[in-house]
Image (cartoon, helix red, strand yellow):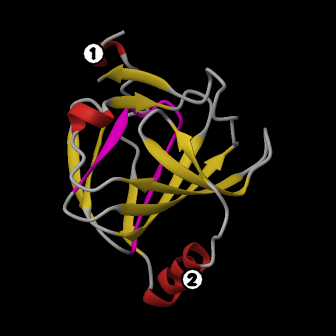
Amino acid sequence: MDLTTLDERLCGKLIWYQIPLQELELYQTLAQQYTGVWVDYERYMKAGLLNVQEGQTGVLLVKFEHNTGIEKLGFHRHPASDRQIVILEGTGQFHYGFPLTSLDVSEGIYLEFPRGTVHTFTTTEKDMIVLSIHRPFIALGDEECLEMYIK
């Protein structure tokens, strides 16, 4: 399937804003205290599984390597879960929708988008760590978790 066949009604409904510093610091402390294992996630990232249970709201830390471009990450969508994301560390861009829209992202930016939204991130010279909330959480190996489009 190419981008022109996507449901365009879902690809443009993005919520984006800067969260208050106090809230950001709370999330950053949560990330700094994580001592668990980082697992491979969505073929090109690492994830720290904070609170995940199949079918329930899941909370993960996701780490993107520095200087990662679209050619490595590709475009994908999550057909069965919505996403809420807070950038905790690093900078980059969030690319989404059809037609393609790109937003600069940095610490404290909150993004929310519905299931089915085609998207990807790119990073700059520092790793980017995000808090990612999945509604609902779909197991990382489940085919409903991720659908790649352009790689």
* Amino acid type indicated by mark 2: Thr
Asked whether, in this view, residue 105 is left or right of residue 80, the answer is left
Expressed as whole percent of the image width and height from the top left, the position of residue 110 reads 43, 65
Quadrant (top left/top right/bottom left/bottom right) for the C terminus: top left
Residue visible at 51% across and 79% down in the picture: 28
Mark 2 or mark 1: which comes first in sequence?
1
Quadrant (top left/top right/bottom left/bottom right) for the N terminus: top left
Q: Which quarter of the picture shows residue 37?
A: bottom right
* Amino acid type indicated by mark 1: Thr
Residue visible at 48% across and 81% down in the picture: 24
Q: Which residues are magenta?
A: 108-123
Using the image as rendered, state which of residue 74 and residue 20 is in the foreground: 74
Residue visible at 70% across and 35% down in the picture: 139
User: How far is disc 2 from disc 1 in space, using C-alphas?
Assistant: 41 Å
Q: Disc 1 on helix, strand or loop? A: helix
Disc count in the image? 2
Expressed as whole percent of the image width and height from the top left, the position of residue 56 reads 78, 46
Using the image as rendered, state which of residue 103 and residue 29 is in the foreground: 29
Expressed as whole percent of the image width and height from the top left, the position of residue 111 reads 42, 58
Using the image as rendered, state which of residue 122 and residue 80 is in the foreground: 122
Residue extending furthest top? 1
Q: Which quarter of the picture shows residue 96?
A: top left
Dominant secondary structure, magenta:
strand
Would you name the residue on which mark 1 appears? Answer: 4
Residue 48 inside the magenta-drawn segment: no
Instruction: Please give the label number shown on residue 29.
Output: 2
Asked whether, in this view, residue 118 is left or right of residue 140, the answer is left
Circle 1 crowding by C-alpha within 10 Å: few under 14, some 14–19, many from 20? few
Instruction: Please give the label number shown on residue 108.
Output: none
Q: Which quarter of the picture shows residue 120?
A: top left
